[in-house]
Image (tube, helix red, strand yellow):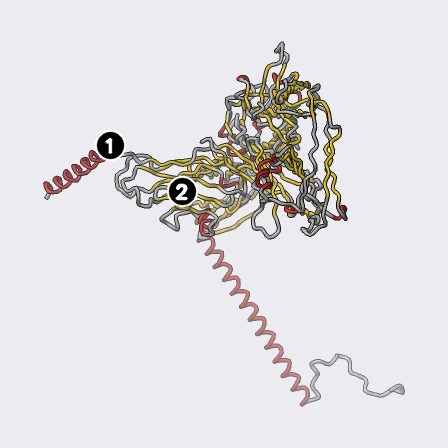
Amino acid sequence: MMSCFLLSVWRSSLILCLGQLLRCGEARVNTEVQAGPLYRVLGSPLYITCSVSGFRSENTDKHFEFRMTKPSNPNFEIQIISSHEDTFGYSSHLIRVIKNEITLKRLSPNSVRFEIKSLQKTDEGEYECTAVNLEGAYDGEYSAKTVVKVIEDSLSVSSSAFTPLSLNEGEALTLTCLASSSTSQHTHLSVAWYLHKDGQEDAQPIISLNRDFTLSPGQGFERRHQAGLIRLDKWGEASYSLKMAEVEPSDQGRFYCQAQEWIQDPDGSWYIIIQKNAEEMALTVKATEVVEPSSPSLAVEISAQPAALQEGQELMLSCNINTQDVEKRFFSVAWLKGSVELARIGPTGVLTVAPEYSVRQKNGELRAGEAKDSSPQRVSISATENRLSIKMQQAGNVTEGGGLHLSCKVDGVQGQLSVTWQLKSARMASFTEIISISQEGVTEIAEEFVSRKVRVMRPATDNFTLELDEVTLSDSGVYQCAVSERKPNSKSHNQAQTTTVTVISVDTLMGVSLISRKTRVTVGEKLELMCRVRGPHMPVTVTWSVQREAKTPDTILTLSPDGTISWSADQNHYQLRVEIRLSRPTQKSFYLSIQKAHEEDSGTYWCQVDQYQLDNEAHWQLKASDSGGAIKLSVKVTENNLSIPKEEAEMNTSRNQDLTIPCNINKQSSHESKFQVTWFWQKEIETKQRPIFTVYRNSTLQDRFGENVRLRYDHPDPSQFSLTFLNPGPENSGLYFCEVEEWLPSLSRGWRKVAVEKSGHFNVSVLTEGDANADSECSTRTYIIIAIVILIVLVLVLLLLVVTMCRSKGSLGNKSGPSLWGESVPMNTSRSGDD
């Protein structure tokens, strides 16, 4: 039998080894999730995609499990959801799974998507996706982890218009949207204006400014945007204005702006962490009447003023219409040069330049009312001086780390424009190029600024805006907008305008203050400090430090911009009392709360704030530092108000009765206090006091009597202690009392005694069984004697009464005999006159 068993084991091992050899060369199992940390906003959804590869059965649905650990307890795994077990999740998550607030959706046989519909702050932590192995042997990675950070929602979106507007067709519309975010993470905003027409389910995008600062018109608005009739302008850091030069009847509906906040995940992809809409504004457009086809005949004449002019001069082409009731009608007017249409004004007064419709118009495919051609008018134009002019916005001061916006407006444009932005800083002798845009619209960035976030925007045909993000001190200097105009059959014309920009260092703007509500606390109380930061909004690192007496300053902890805490000194002492109490109620306020202060927490505290900024290579660079001053805090031991009853008492008991010596404390001590209780006994008043039992502050018990005495210790509540003698003897008689010591923790000196009090004496007498029986017998005899005496007295009284009654009867029968109750003097029986 043994040989058969060994043979079976050998065969199994051989098969396993062969199986492993056959699998050599196959792809190892690999499980992947999105790389973290993933920053997501409180209340927004979370999506984590988990995929696995390398299983032999590629087309079979794989099962996945999701778990998490929280920063406060990284060693404790919390089961959340499983694709093959409905009751997999712990109770903290199972209810959310049942309500479909947490789901696991299958994307393919080898991938799933984990979803939390609305993130809670407690959802922050490290998530682990595990692919369940049903193939027996393990070969590869079956789990993958990613970190999720839950940040506050700081996106704010609002609109300037609240009341409905009513415009006539052709009038101008301007709306302003305020959008900003105060998150400490590096995010981008995109802003778009929408029109929601009555009767349509979805809103229609009008124009949007994308996260990469490019303008995109919505479908149906391209032509008007190209003609400069629809614009989206950004003013300052948070203002976005929509301008529609001439509204049309189709523009009627509800307008609103939408802001999206984007963050770049570690894998390089951009993700919308939050999206908000501003209030809607209703617009009513009053349309004008259209000329009926049956209108009376009309005559059209054209005139040019002047007929001969030089290049650059103004040419006035007048189209005169002669018909009845002109003021009640609307016309479509087109100007043509030869057979090519130059411009057209529609019945609503909107001017459009549409050469692509000239052929269709000649063929009769496009008609507006009744049209007639005027007689031709010859115009001659000769070259003259350049009328190009530039107006540049004055920038002034810009904060380091902020954004620079310079606007260059060009007037008198007659040809194609190219624009170049240049800078002459203090370290430069001449202007150097930053960025340029050619006449064909091609943008080129100078090598020095390729790694910078620089761009040129053209919100209107005559407006060019330079935007430079995250400016540095070296960006101070004189900025120049150089414009070159090129016209057919003419030489180029150049114009330039300059403005001075000063970048202010954040060192001069940032300020830190340290505030504490109380500078003196007692042991066990809460110690709270607030570090408040003033200045521009930038990622910061906050370091809390303390100096005790004349010792070297110690760093307590450092809070990084991503919320990570690093402990430096006395981690065990501070971590439990400070970490579930380190808070950031606002973007610029940091709280440090130490629960249950110890005496060693006394010292001088301060906070150090360092501001950081991402450089061109996505590395954090220190930009400014400041300290919040110093606050001296003292933690004192509570006053000695330990009190124990001092009353004297006498106690008599017998051997068959238990003897209890109480020890009560009249004090509401702090949670930090520990008590040591010792009971003492002395045979007589003049003899030496002897300790018999001690309860130490760590709850260790010591029986110090050592004389075959059975003792029982009780501690029913924090202020009551008792020691009970079981079946005591006469030798246990004597004086008893208890002594209580109060101890408080001290880091430098360990536990130390802060108070000692003694109770009053208990005079205890323990009687033997013989003494007790003798006393009982004596008492019984005494009771019997007293009863006999009382009985004898009662008998004698009864006999005396009987004798007396008998004599009284004898005197009534024989009157000559003397009366027992009469007096010795005879009574006078004669009546007087008064009777």
Q: Could you tell me which secondary element the residue under label 2 belongs to?
A: strand
| Eye-nearest disc, 2 or 1 | 1
Near mark 1 (Cα within 10 A), the count class, few <14, some 14-19 or many ≥20, is: few
Give coordinates of residue 644: x percent, y percent: 59, 41
Near mark 2 (Cα within 10 A), the count class, few <14, some 14-19 or many ≥20, is: many
Q: Nearer the viewer, residue 477 or 833?
A: 477
Q: Nearer the viewer, residue 298 or 254?
A: 298
Q: Is residue 488 above or below residue 75?
A: above
Q: Nearer the viewer, residue 664 or 211?
A: 211
Quadrant location of the C terminus in the rendered image: bottom right
Residue 628 location, quadrant: top right
Instruction: Kindly tell me whether residue 15 is visible in this rendering.
Output: yes
Give coordinates of residue 800: x percent, y percent: 61, 77
Residue 228 location, quadrant: top right
Q: Is residue 383 above or below residue 762?
A: above
Mark 2 residue type: Phe
Quadrant location of the N terminus in the rendered image: top left
Q: Could you tell me which secondary element the residue under label 1 belongs to?
A: loop
Residue under label 1, please give it. Answer: 25
Q: Is residue 586 above or below residue 412?
A: below
Give coordinates of residue 37: x percent, y percent: 47, 33
On residue 791, which mark appears?
A: none
Question: As drawn, which residue projects farthest toward the right?
Answer: 833
On residue 66, which mark appears?
A: 2
Mark 1 residue type: Gly
| Residue at point 51%, 22% (across, down) | 619
Give coordinates of residue 757: x percent, y percent: 58, 37
Counting every numbered tag in the picture gives: 2
Give the CA distance from mark 2 to mark 1. Answer: 30 Å
